[in-house]
């Protein structure tokens, strides 16, 4: 996947991203979203959550590290939104139950700032980079 878009096309982008993901009966599905501040990681996460049937307001978990939601579509039973921006040591993942989250079936884990916790991410993940130049954004699989 590599695509240029503007924010008005975010719902279409979310559907394309969801096409890359499948709920697993044995472990969590991990989506790593990398990009600079303002690239659109949280906007994409909010749109993905809506597309998955999450009715709660999705906000960036910058200060709490992780937020948990209940999707109703696409086979996912749990959505975990993690913002790793403030994580300085992988041990900080322990209190949120990181290892348990990764073992939870039918769970989608969306990680913003995955480069901050690269050593804790599973090898099998979808990793997307979002870049921006003004209103123009590019999303590509890395």
Image: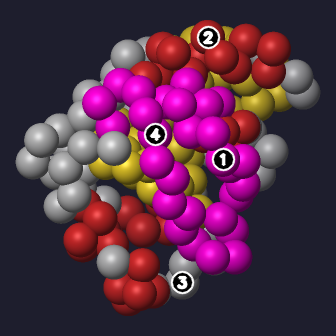
Seen at 41% across and 87% down, the residue is 95
Q: Which residues are magenta?
A: 47-76
Are there few (<14), some (14-19), or many (20+) residues within 10 Å of tag 2? few
On the question of residue 36 being in view, the answer is no
At x 33% / y 72%, what residue is drawn? Answer: 98
Residue matched to label 2? 12
Cα–Cα span, label 1 and label 2: 21 Å
Mark 4 vs mark 1, CA separation in Å:
10 Å
Q: How is the image coloured?
A: secondary structure
Identify whether 90 is placed above or below 140.
below
Side of 63 relative to 123 (left or right): right
**Element marked by disc 1:** loop
Residue wearing tag 1: 56
Give the mark nearest the N terminus, 1 or 2: 2
Q: Give the x, y percent position of residue 57.
A: 72, 48
The residue tagged 4 is: 71
Answer with the quarter of the image where residue 7 lies: top right
Sequence-wise first label, 4 or 2: 2
| Up-down relation of residue 88 to residue 29 (above or below) | below
């Amino acid at each position: 996947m590599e695509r240029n878009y503007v924010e008005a096309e975010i719902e279409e982008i979310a559907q394309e991203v969801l096409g890359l993901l499948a709920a697993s009966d044995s472990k969590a599905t991990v989506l790593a979203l990398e990009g600079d501040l303002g690239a659109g990681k949280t906007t994409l996460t909010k749109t993905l959550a809506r597309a998955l049937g999450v009715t709660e307001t999705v906000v960036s978990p910058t200060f709490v590290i992780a937020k948990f939601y209940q999707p109703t579509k696409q086979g996912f039973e749990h959505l975990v939104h993690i913002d790793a921006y403030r994580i300085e040591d992988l041990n900080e993942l322990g209190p949120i139950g990181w290892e348990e989250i990764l073992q939870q079936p039918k769970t989608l884990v969306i990680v913003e700032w995955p480069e901050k916790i690269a050593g804790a991410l599973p090898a099998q993940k979808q990793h997307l980079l979002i870049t921006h130049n003004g209103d123009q954004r590019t999303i590509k699989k890395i």
